[in-house]
Image (cartoon, rainbow, N blue to C red):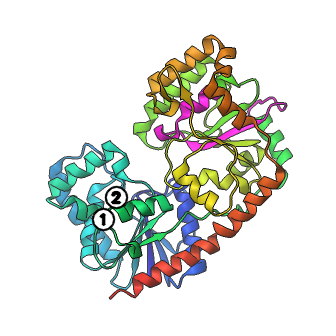
Amino acid sequence: MRLFIFHYHLQTGGVTRVIRSHVAAARDGTEAAEIILLTGRTPPDGDLGADRVVVNPDWDYLDPGVAAAACRPLFARIHEGLLRHVGPDDILHVHNPNLGKNPVFTAALSALAGDGMRVVLHLHDFAEDRPGNMSFIRRLVDALGEDLDRVMYPAAPRVLFGVLNTADRRRLIDADIAAARIHWLPNPVAFPDDLPRDASACRAAICSRFALDPGLPIFLYPVRVIRRKNIGEFILFACLFGDRAHWLVTRPPENPRERPGYEEWRRFAETVGANVLFDVGMHADFPALMRAADRVVTTSRREGFGMVFLEPWLFGKPVVGRNLPHVTQDFLDTGLILNHLYDSLPVDEYATDFASLSASEQRRWIRQCLEDPAAGRRSKGIAAAAATLFAEVAESEIEHNRRQIEQKYSIRAYGQKLRRVYRALSEVR
């Protein structure tokens, strides 16, 4: 059995780290004779651990403005391209197949699954949660004359589903997918081999590199700044508590459609004098940044898996910020301690949560808070969130979480889960 692992791109970031861990786990836990990566763009990092990488631009993200007339020939090329590589005894493991990034690929994959290809559909996110993506899928599936349900969730016998959390598993069961076809495949968390051991040296180097006051703690948001990461909330804290910490963000978005919103937030932060630095990951090594940080912050309003809730503990850093219960409940159930997360940031003036506001409304409210920063800091929602962000975290809690993550979310544990899935798929005749 050869194992093919697909994602539309393998650019620098979270998805590529997951793919690299997937390859390592498959080598550790399965009997794959060869592991091949399939992708739509040439990866900047050529060494992802696979035996080889196959690049086909037809498999990349598709422009939402694509004409309906172009769909049928593209379908044929994608169908033929996959058949050229994946044989009847192979397994194709596809990450985020039906998110709406390339609906023609999704339709071609569904057709191949119906013809007997062995496929694992690994769902990280759902197009149903993104109206624009869902509209794109409907338009192109209609253009192809295909059935939407069959394309999104093929019922072919050689198709199994992977999910990142039990909430998503329940979601598929509620959609009438048999429980036996759904496997819990939480992303593995790899302990970095090149982890700098001397955190104080890393901190001194980062403070020097970015001219930071070494007397203030570093609050790091290790993220590509896209809309769902809710960067406005992070900037709000940087505005009101810039005298208590440095607030750093690692990377800009890859997606050009996300770039205008990101640049607008950057200009806003500069205009209001927020103590926040953007793009630090472009100028400093990621492990060094993680070791230098005092806290890792997340203000994201939606995650598929939630690697940010796990990975920092391996660097010896606590995670603070916005809670996402549908994601964190699995982590709590496996024994993690997550006491430094707030469930919401209420904004009384709008009678809603800050994360629910539009970007313009968020900026308006931040400016309002800055008219009287002391009053802003005392407001009920901000005061409660700040108390969570700045609360002391015991070293015993950090060590406990590190041990739990190494044991339950390791590469080896993931490899064992993959072995069970691939064996089940290989036994279907």
Q: Position of residue 126 (x, y in %)?
A: 38, 53
Task: Identify the residue under disc 2.
Answer: 98
Q: Position of residue 268 (x, y in %)?
A: 54, 21
- Does 404 appear above or below 307? below
Which one is in front, 46 or 155? Answer: 155
Is there CB contact under 8 Å for labels 1 and 2? yes
Q: Quadrant of residue 79?
A: bottom left
Which one is in front, 141 or 46? Answer: 141
Picture residue at 56% right of the left edge, 16% below the top: 367
Query: Residue flagged by tag 1: what amino acid is it?
Result: Tyr
- For residue 12, say whether it is visible: no
Residue stretch in magenta: 210-237
Under circle 1, the secondary element is: loop
Work out which quarter of the rendered image holds the N terminus and state it. bottom left
Task: Identify the residue under disc 1.
Answer: 153
Q: Quadrant of residue 86?
A: bottom left
